Amino acid sequence: VNVDDIPQRCVPLQHQPGDQLVLLDSSWHADFFPLAEQLKRDGVGIVSVIYDLIPLTHPQFCDAGLVRVFNHWFDWIARTADGY
């Protein structure tokens, strides 16, 4: 198979000031914080959908790893997002 014959499945993100990045779900598991921060510096707004805060309010019902990752993410999203 020739590499040139393989369809490109990912296209680089094209953005411009005023665009909005909407984080719909589980963004605490992705390692995209530096990219999102660069987008914000480029004028892209960041909006996060938060379905629940159970890992923060009731950590005893969650896996310890999730609680740790979610807490780190929540601190970051609280500083970074323009809306929720």
Image (spheres, grey):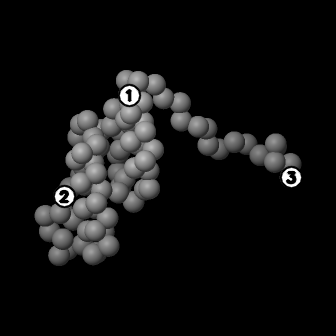
Instruction: Say whether residue 13 is left or right of residue 3.
Output: left
Instruction: Say whether residue 5 is left or right of residue 78.
Output: right
Residue under label 2: 53
In three-dimensional space, the C-alpha distance between marks 1 and 3, rounded to whole angstroms, equals 41 Å
Residue mark closest to the camera, 1 vs 2: 1
Q: Residues within 10 Å of mark 3 (few under 14, many from 20)?
A: few
The answer to whether 1 is drawn above or below residue 81 in the figure is below
**Identity, as a three-letter code, of the amino acid under mark 1:** Gly
**Identity, as a three-letter code, of the amino acid under mark 3:** Val
Residue 10 location (% of width, % of height): 61, 43
Label pair 1/2, CB-CB below 8 angstroms: no
The answer to whether 13 is drawn above or below residue 27 in the figure is above
In primary-sequence order, the first of circles 1 and 3 is 3
Quadrant occupied by the C terminus? top left
- Residue 9 occupies quadrant: top right
Which disc, if any, is residue 1?
3
